[in-house]
Amino acid sequence: MTVLVAGIGNVFLGDDAFGVEVVRRLAPADVPAGVEVADYGIRGIHLAYELLDGRYDTLVLVDAVPLGQRPGTLAVLDATGQVDVGAPGAVDAHAMSPDVVLAALRGLGGSVGRVLVVGCQPQVLAEGMGLSAPVRAAVERAVPLVLDVAREAAGPSSSTLAPSPGSQRRPVR
C-alpha cells in the first residue's frame, strides 16, 4: 500500500495553517515505509494532479476542519466516496479545502481508493500568521496521531513500531 500524507492550508489565515504545521513536524525517520509526506499548503490543485497517476492507495489529508467542537479538538474522518464533483470552473486554487481538492481530482478523471482526514477544529481563520494557542497545542498531539493513521493505512509491513499512546479515532480534546 502506498499512502500520501498531505498537509493543506493557508499559512496567512491563522489556524488554517494547522495541516502545514503538522507535516512540517513529521520527522522523516518516523515516517513508515510506504508513506510519503508533503506540504501542499494552498496548492490543492497540484495535489489533485499528483493523485492522478493512481500511485496512492490512501490519501491522508491534514487540515483545519469545522468539527463543531472546542478549538484544538482533533478527529480522524473517513471521507472516502463522500465528495461530489462541483460545477465546472468552481475551483479556486487559493481556497482548496479537502472536498474541493477531491472534487477537482474526480473532475480530472482521477480517484484515490481511501481518503482519511486528520482534522483540527480551528479557533481563528482570519488574516494573520500564527496558530491560536489551542490549535498550536493540538499540533503536538496530531503528529503521533497522523503517524498512527499513516502506519495503519500502509499496512502491517509498513513498520514494527507500536501505535502512539493515546491515539484515537474520535474527537480528542
Image: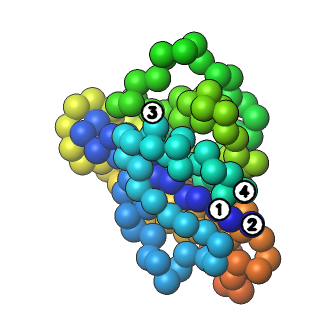
Q: Look at the picture and state if 45 lies above or below 145.
A: above
| Crowd class of label 2 (few under 14; some 14 to 19; many from 20; radius 10 Å) | some
Residue 154 position within the rendered picture, expressed as x and y whole percent measured from the top left: 72, 68
Q: Between disc 3 and disc 2, whose residue precedes?
A: 2
- Cβ–Cβ below 8 Å for labels 2 and 1? yes
Mark-to-mark CA distance, 4 and 3: 21 Å
Asked if the residues shown at circle 4 and circle 3 are in contact, with their CB atoms under 8 angstroms apart, the answer is no
Report the front residue among 103 and 128. Answer: 103
Q: Tags 3 and 2 in contact by the CB under 8 Å rule?
A: no
Residue 96: mark: 3
Secondary structure, mark 4, is loop
Q: Amino acid at mark 1?
A: Val
Pointer 2: what residue? 1
Q: Secondary structure at mark 2?
A: loop
Q: Residue at x 51, y 60 (%)?
A: 142
Q: Amino acid at mark 3?
A: Met
Q: Position of residue 56 (x, y in %)?
A: 67, 57
Q: Measure the C-alpha gap from mark 1 to mark 3.
A: 20 Å
Query: Amino acid type of disc 2?
Result: Met
Label 3 Cα neighbours within 10 Å, binned few <14 / some 14-19 / many ≥20: many
Task: Say which element carries label 1.
Answer: strand
**Sequence-wise first label, 4 or 3:** 4
Pick the front one: 123 or 88: 88
Are the residues at dot 1 and dot 4 in contact (C-beta closer than 8 Å)? yes
Disc 4: which residue: 57
* Residue 173 appearing in the image: yes
Residue at x 46% of width, y 52% of height: 7
**Identity of the amino acid at label 4?**
Asp
**Mark 2 vs mark 1, CA separation in Å:** 7 Å
Q: Provide residue 47's location: percent of width, then percent of height.
A: 50, 46
Q: Which residue is mark 1?
A: 3
Q: Residue at x 64, y 22 (%)?
A: 85
